[in-house]
Image (tube, rainbow, N blue to C red):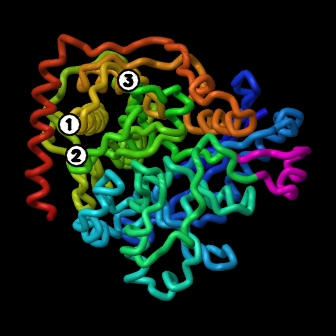
Amino acid sequence: MYLGLDLGTSGVKAMLIDGDQKIIGSANGSLDVSRPHSGWSEQEPSHWIRATEEAVSGLKAKHPKELAAVKGIGLSGQMHGATLLDAEDKVLRPCILWNDTRSFVEAAALDSDPRFRRLTGNIVFPGFTAPKLAWVAKHEPEIFAKVAKVLLPKDYLRLWLTGEHISEMSDSAGTSWLDTGKRKWSSELLAVTGLDEKQMPHLIEGTEQGGKLRGELASKWGISGSVVVAGGAGDNAASACGMGTVSDGAAFVSLGTSGVLFAANAAYLPKPESAVHAFCHALPNTWHQMGVILSATDALNWHSSVTGKSAADLTTELGETLKAPSGVTFLPYLSGERTPHNDAVIRGAFIGLEHESSRVVLTQAVLEGVSFAIRDNLEALRSAGTDISRVTAIGGGSRSRYWLASIATVLGVPVDLPADGDFGAAFGAARLGLIAATGADPVGVCTPPKTAGTIEPVAALSGAYEDSYKGYRALYPAIKSLQH
């Protein structure tokens, strides 16, 4: 048996698979986000451990024998979080999360140093780890002075699981400290933020062994024998392993809290000015590009909280048949935007409201706004040398056929739906655990799921959506001039 642990923003998912990659069971532990100030987003690392314990206990209650047979564990996690530890591995402050934008001034200052884009292949975004450390150095110098190790969220879980300070390439590529082409820490970039390699975890590939499960936890979970913990992956690379998106040109769209358009690459293809991320993949000698929007299902959940209707009820009201754009446009910049604008200050808007703008019209606008933002990502990927002929949809938002029809029509490409099953980050992490424990061929393990169906673009509405997208594109510069 192999265990995948995925540390998300809203919870930890634990998934058990067997040697044939059949899913035996899964369980969850819940998490909350603290937002003490506008633009801030934090979590206590101790809560990750509690949620992991909760998830593993849930698995143990249902599948004690199978859990006892675990030989490999893979880790996946939300990227970019700054988990700061002192010399005794004590947490110095709450972790500053991926969607925290407080360090936009520091990010701009680091990004103005040409070495960052040249070595990392990426813009220094406010959500990345390096500017967060620059912010801590400036605003919490007494904490910065005590920093002995900086860990990404899933690697703090690894420390608890194994006692080791280890990370891997895909997650570390989102720190702004990795030489992404050479797959190693850049001592030059670390020095700019007052750090050195001693404060960083040791780097391995996602498919390699990254420690062994501590005996105390193994006995608590009823596991006997040695358990390997794999390097693992950042959440999007782990999802790609789960989806089999590992060969050149394969792509998926993820509708989770954030939205991601992800393409696997056989070579390193940076184009930072497009705000496309060029990161290492979890498999050796493989990279990927992705565009990221900060609010996908988060935008629908916000609309749900305002209207008092569940997200499922809102999308059910729309039906499954795609409608023509209503004339109401939603900009989903609820906490700023990453690709293609790299703008932490911008905020969302509804444009074109009238007396007849019902709740259904607003729901349609929210889904379309996210679809248009993903189209922005497609255009950015194209400018960076990657074209996409079809995508597979994953994430909670992919349950809405209406939303997928909107995305297919706006992108102009078919959207494949994987056959029943869970092929997300926890499954990808479990696959990495299997590879690390058995030495199996990574490409042979990370195969795509069967396709259950395909949603084609609605040709009759393509022109209307293209016009609506052009209008959407014109709105960002207009509201930027009001908000900056």
Q: Left or right of 234: which side holds 403?
A: left
Q: Which residue is mark 1?
A: 383
Q: Residue at x 56, y 22 (%)?
A: 447
Q: Would you say residue 316 is visible in this rendering?
A: no
- The answer to which of 392 and 328 lies nearer the viewer is 392
Q: Residue at x 25, y 33 (%)?
A: 385
Where residue 400 sits, quadrant-wise, is top left
Disc 3: CA contacts within 10 A as few (<14), some (14-19) or many (>=20): many
> Please, which residue is most extreme toward the bottom here?
142
The type of residue carrying mark 2 is Ser
Q: Residue at x 46, y 32 (%)?
A: 312
Q: Secondary structure at mark 1?
A: helix
Q: Give the magenta-colored segment's residue range.
A: 212-229
Q: Residue at x 63, y 58 (%)?
A: 166
Q: Which residue is mark 2?
A: 274
Does residue 310 lie above or below 50 as drawn? above
Q: Left or right of 243: which side holds 388?
A: left
The type of residue carrying mark 1 is Ser
Q: Which residue is mark 3?
A: 391
The type of residue carrying mark 3 is Val
Looking at the figure, which quarter contains the C terminus? bottom left
Q: Secondary structure at mark 3?
A: strand
Tag 3 and tag 1, C-beta contact below 8 Å: no
